[in-house]
Amino acid sequence: MAALGSPARTLRGLLRELRHLNAATGRPYRDTAAYRYLMKAFRAHRVTSEKLCRAQHELHFQAATYLCLLRSVREHLALHQEFHGKGERSVEESAGLVGLQLPRQPGGKGWEPA
């Protein structure tokens, strides 16, 4: 399993994803129930003087997993919008998508060498 990093970094990543989600609505992300829940949960599970705080580690793991999900969904939607099929394409358009050009005939269609 990869290292989780610091809980503060995970929280900042979650808040960044909340900002992306609420950008479309125009509402501030701090007015959402998700923001209030995240802040309450992270404040309740701060590191204490205990050497091993299982609840804090469990919350951090769940938060990192949820951050991965939110980030992956956002990136998937961006890729889907960019590469989603737009119906039937011509041969020229299909070649252009992969960076190719079709050969051109000097005289156009029906050109016959003399």
Image (cartoon, rainbow, N blue to C red):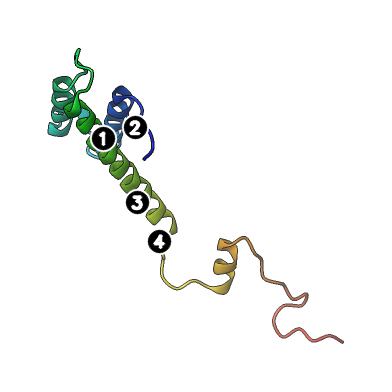
Q: Secondary structure at mark 4?
A: loop
How far apart, in angstroms, are the residues tagged by discs 1 and 3? 25 Å
Along the viewing direction, whichever of 16 and 83 lies nearer the viewer: 16
How far apart, in angstroms, are the residues tagged by discs 1 and 4? 33 Å
Q: Which residue is mark 3?
A: 77
Q: Secondary structure at mark 3?
A: helix
Residue plotted at (34% across, 46% down): 72
The quarter in which the N terminus is drawn is top left
Asked whether the viewer can see residue 50, the reply is yes
The answer to whether the residues at label 1 and label 2 have Cβ atoms under 8 Å apart is yes
How far apart, in angstroms, are the residues tagged by discs 2 and 3? 25 Å
In the image, residue 75 sits, relative to residue 57, either above or below, namely below
Q: Earlier in the sequence, mark 1 or mark 3?
A: 1
How far apart, in angstroms, are the residues tagged by discs 1 and 2? 7 Å
Task: Name the residue type under label 3.
Answer: Leu
Residue plotted at (87% across, 87% down): 114
Q: Earlier in the sequence, mark 1 or mark 4?
A: 1
Q: Earlier in the sequence, mark 1 or mark 2?
A: 2
Q: Which residue is mark 2?
A: 4
Q: Could you say which disc has been placed on residue 3 in the image?
A: none
Along the viewing direction, whichever of 83 and 3 lies nearer the viewer: 3
Q: Earlier in the sequence, mark 4 or mark 2?
A: 2
Residue 91: x %, y % from top left: 57, 73
* Neighbours of disc 3 within 10 Å: few (<14), some (14-19), many (20+): few
Instruction: Name the front one of labels 1 and 4.
Output: 1
Q: Which residue is mark 4?
A: 84
- Quadrant position of residue 60: top left
Residue plotted at (23% across, 18% down): 51
Instruction: Name the front one of labels 4 and 2.
Output: 2
